[in-house]
Image (spheres, rainbow, N blue to C red):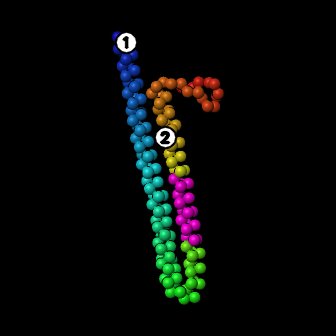
Amino acid sequence: MDDDATRTDIHRHKSRKRRLSAAEERSNDELDQEVDVEVWEALSKSFMQVQSVLDQNRALIQQANDNHQSRAPDDLTRNVSLIREINSNISKVISIYSDLSSNFSGIVHQHRAAITPAKNDNDSRETGDRKLDPVKSGVESQ
């Protein structure tokens, strides 16, 4: 009879662990969705900025081509400032992509950092493995 009671207690404990794991999975899924929204918003904003600058460059390049074809001295002189503006815009695009890369990388690292400890905690709870406490070197903790 005691063996049956012990088995029932073990079964309840495992079920509770499974429910906790499912709740944590939902929490991780919600975090994934939040990160996805954050990433897509950042990407969209950056791509819209880049597209705006590239559209402006397209117009400047067309104007520079028209000036070049006219071969009028004033138009050719104007091309110098147009080319400088185009170069400045290219620098803006590079800066936007650089910021986007940094922000995206930061978001991914934060997301991984948030999930990795939770996953490691789940793994050690489910397997009953002992891990070394990073603060107390050489001392095992549960």
For mark 1, does the 10 Å Cα neighbourhood hold few (<14), some (14 to 19), or many (20 or more) residues? few
Circles 2 and 1, Cβ within 8 Å, touching? The answer is no
SS at mark 1 in the image = helix
For the residues marked 2 and 1, what is the alpha-carbon distance in whole angstroms?
38 Å
Farthest residue to the top: give it.
1
Image quadrant for the N terminus? Answer: top left
Q: Which percent across, then down, holds residue 113?
A: 53, 42
Badge 1 amino acid: Asp
Looking at the rendered image, the disc whose residue lies closer to the viewer, 2 or 1, is: 2
Q: Which percent across, then down, holds residue 76?
A: 56, 84
> 109 above or below 102?
above
Left or right: 29 in relation to 90: left
Report the residue marked by disc 2. Answer: 115
Residue occupying image coordinates x 42% and y 33%? 20
Q: Which percent across, then down, holds residue 118?
A: 49, 37
> 59 above or below 91?
below
Q: Main secondary structure of the magenta part?
A: helix
Left or right: 51 in relation to 76: left
Badge 2 amino acid: Ile
Image quadrant for the C terminus? Answer: top right
**Residue 129 among those drawn in magenta:** no
For mark 2, does the 10 Å Cα neighbourhood hold few (<14), some (14 to 19), or many (20 or more) residues? some
Residue occupying image coordinates x 52% and y 37%? 117
Residue occupying image coordinates x 46% and y 67%? 51
Q: Give the range drawn in magenta.
A: 87-104
Report the residue marked by disc 1. Answer: 3
SS at mark 2 in the image = helix
Please state which of residues 76 and 28 is positioned toward the viewer in this rendering. Answer: 76
Please state which of residues 50 and 130 is positioned toward the viewer in this rendering. Answer: 50
Q: Residue 13 carries which label?
A: none
Residue occupying image coordinates x 60% and y 29%? 133
